[in-house]
Amino acid sequence: MEIRASDIQAVLGGSQILRGVDLWAERGELVGIIGPNGSGKSTLLKCIYRVLQPTGGVVYLDGRALSEYSYKQSARQVAVVAQHNYYNFDFSVQDVVMMGRAPHKRALDRDNAQDHQMVAQALKTVGMADFARRSFATLSGGEQQRVILARALAQDTPCLILDEPTNHLDIKFQLQLMDIVKGLDRTVIAAIHDLNIAAMYCDRLYAVKEGRVVADGTPEEVLTPELIRTVYEVEAEVFRDREGGLRIFYHPSAHGSG
């Protein structure tokens, strides 16, 4: 699936958060959105997965305006792993992942063998198969994030939206989660906090600051010391490791604490 956001604008609480953002993700591409806190990354993603209605601009799925899809139709196209996932009820892990099957059902349809098979496979993919009967509320933040990814995989959509998916995960599971996502045959758009993760896994990047795209291109094109200074207001060194991977090293503030 190809996703295109054209001239997206968003006003929240009287403040303009997005100021005419354009974004394009080709079929099967992993596109990262980077930028400091408050730059508009999450707001842009919410406009794409329909939690927010943009005040201007259009989102297209395979050339068709998102507004032309019913909510159920768009939920069959786009699955979401959001930053925060709170449940007031004591759902089991299996029940949470089974929620991903809802867009494929009619009202009152019961879970069938295919649903259970897809849920089991999704939990296996994220390494949580042994937790199926556990209460979701008893899991650590990292474990919960892996279960939410499993729910998105069970939704079986051609596109996946990730809002800072490696939050709450230790290093092993950050890399494991991104390896899983990278290996999917799906279009992925992800807001990413860690620039080294973005460099390792993304095909293309959009750098956002104060609601505008200030750079886009491959990680090599975007992640330069000049861009990092402009967007994040820190000094950084960008180099290649011994395997050719792009790496970012941050320099401490010249002002220090002493």
Image (cartoon, rainbow, N blue to C red):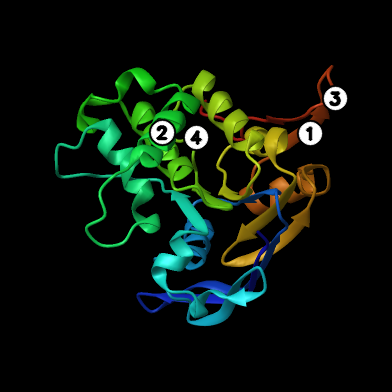
Which residue is the extreme one toward the bottom? 56
Precedes in sequence: disc 4 or disc 3: 4
User: Which marked residue is nearer to the observer: mark 1 or mark 4?
Assistant: 4
The three-letter amino acid code for the residue at tag 3 is: Gly
Of discs 2 and 4, which sits in the foreground? Answer: 2
Residue 244: assigned label: 3
Q: Is residue 149 left or right of residue 250?
A: left
Residue 50, can we see it? Answer: no
Q: Residue furthest front?
A: 113
Tell me residue 101's x, y (percent): 37, 48
Instruction: Say whether residue 231 is left or right of residue 78.
Output: right
At horizontal 48% and vertical 76% (from top left) the residue drawn is 54
Q: What label sits on residue 117 in the rendered view?
A: 2
Disc 4 marks a residue whose amino acid type is: Thr
Q: Does the residue at mark 3 contact the one at mark 2 (Cβ under 8 Å)? A: no
Q: Nearer the viewer, residue 258 or 129?
A: 129
